[in-house]
Image (tube, rainbow, N blue to C red):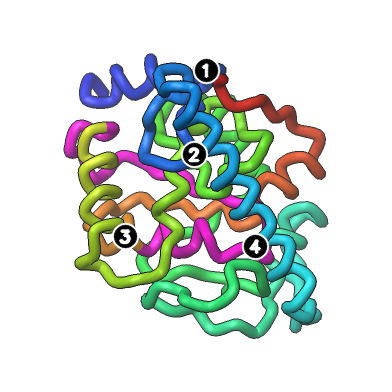
Amino acid sequence: MKRFAYLSAMLCLWPGAALSQDSFGGSQSSRPQQQQEQQQQQQQQSQSREQMDRQSVPQQQPQQRPSNADPQSAAELQDFGVPATSQLHAGAMHGPTPSSIPGGQIITTKGLVELIQGRQTPFLLLDILGGPEILPGAVFAVPAHQAGNFNDQTQREFGGFLQQMTGGDKETPLVLYCQSTQCWMSYNAALRAINMGYTNVLWYRGGIEAWKAAGQQTTYPQQ
C-alpha cells in the first residue's frame, strides 16, 4: 500500500483539494486576478449551456428499477433505455445516460460513502462538473468531459494529469462525477480514463445531486 500513501495524504478527504475548473488540477489561488475572472466567465458560460441543454432535452422515463437496491441506489441505477457506448458522447451534455459503462463500474452514493469511511483504499475523486459546490476531497478535471477522440489533445493532457496524480499506477481507483444521472460529462471522462488503461474506473452516475439528496455534505472550491 506504499504506492498509495501520497495519494491518501493529498486527496482522500483533504478539504482543500479542489483546484482549478478550467484545467487539470491547477490552483485557483495561484492564478492572476485576470485569469480568475476569465475562469469565472467560462464557468458561467458552461453553466448556461448546461441549463439550455436541460431545457431542450426531454426527460425520458426509466424502463425499470432494480428490485434489490435501496430507493436511493435504485434511483441512481435507473435504466433510461440508453445503450452503453465506448465512444465519446458528442451531443448535449444534459440528457439521459446509460445504466452501465464499458470497461468501468457504476458506484452509488452508498458505495462511495463506504469507500470514504473505510479509508482502506485510497482513491482519486474527480469533479467533472465545475460547479459552485464539490464533494469533499475532489479535484477538478472538467476539461476531460469534452467530446473528440482518444488521440486528441484533451486525452494527452488528461493522461498526463492522471499519470502525475496516480504515480503511474493504473490500478488506482478513479471516481468521476458530474451533476446527476442526466449528465454525460463524467461518462466521457470515465471513458477517457478507461481508454488509457485504468482498471478501476468508478463512474458516480448519481453525481452531486444524489450526494446532496442522501444528506451528504458538500464543500466550496478553494479560492
Residue in the foreground of this view, choosing between 120 and 194 = 194
What range is drawn magenta here?
Answer: 165-191
- For disc 1, the marked residue is 16
| Dot in front, 2 or 3 | 2
| Dot in front, 4 or 1 | 4
Residue in the foreground of this view, choosing between 29 and 139 = 29
Query: CB atoms at circles 4 and 1 under 8 Å apart?
Result: no
Going from N to C along the chain, the mark reached first, 2 or 3, is: 2
Element class at badge 3 = helix
**Which residue is pictured at 67% across the width and 73% down the height?**
95
- For disc 3, the marked residue is 194
Tell me residue 179's x, y (percent): 66, 53
Tell me residue 54's x, y (percent): 74, 68
Q: Residues within 10 Å of mark 2 (few under 14, many from 20)?
A: many
Going from N to C along the chain, the mark reached first, 4 or 3, is: 4
Q: Amino acid at mark 4?
A: Arg
**Which residue is pictured at 23% across the width and 45% down the height?**
170
Q: Quadrant of the C terminus?
A: top right
Q: Could you say which disc has been placed on residue 21 in the image?
A: 2
